[in-house]
Amino acid sequence: QVQLVESGGGLVQPGGSLRLSCAASGFTFDYYNIAWFRQVPGKEREGVSCISSDGSTYYADSVKGRFTISRDNAKNTVYLQMNSLKPDDTAVYYCARSTYAFITMCLMESTRFNSWGQGTQVTVSS
């Protein structure tokens, strides 16, 4: 059974940092792309960052230069280091696993991911 569990969210002041973790189980972790999405009530889920099975990384323009995604295949975990946080980063953050294995590109479209975590709230406010 595929399971993804996010952690690390919380309340942080503008300019601060948080590191989110996504712990995976129930599948061969190395084979799949893992992405982070975020969602604000009333808005569509937005792709934030993705890391492919070969370690290539992709970022939304809104977070480039501030967020860093990484994966530790030995721990079956993906991380999202978020620096210089802004109030606009406030959202529920979800990690997701690609539907198919061995996909070389990470296209951050939610329809390409079929397993999702429960989400972790990130609030950036003074």
Image (cartoon, rainbow, N blue to C red):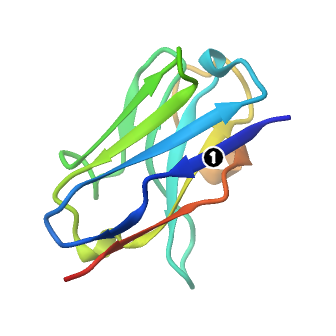
Q: Secondary structure at mark 1?
A: strand
Give how far across and how far down residue 84 sits, in percent.
16, 58
Amino acid on which the number 1 mark rests in the picture: Val
- Camera-nearest residue between 120 and 102: 120
- Camera-nearest residue between 116 and 21: 21
- The C terminus: image quadrant: bottom left
Give me the residue at 63% from left, 46% from top. 5
Please indicate whether residue 21 sits to the left or right of residue 66 in the image. right
Please indicate whether residue 89 sits to the left or right of residue 72 in the image. left
Give me the residue at 48% from left, 14% from top. 54
- Camera-nearest residue between 42 and 120: 120
- Camera-nearest residue between 17 and 94: 17
Give how far across and how far down residue 41 sits, in percent.
55, 82
Give how far across and how far down residue 87 sits, in percent.
26, 76
- The N terminus: image quadrant: top right
Task: From this view, report whether residue 116 is shown above or below residue 44.
Answer: above
Q: Which residue is mark 1?
A: 5
Task: From this view, report whether residue 20 is shown above or below residue 56.
Answer: below
Give how far across and how far down residue 114 sits, in percent.
75, 44
Give me the residue at 43% from left, 60% from top. 9
Task: From this view, report whether residue 118 is shown above or below residue 50.
Answer: below
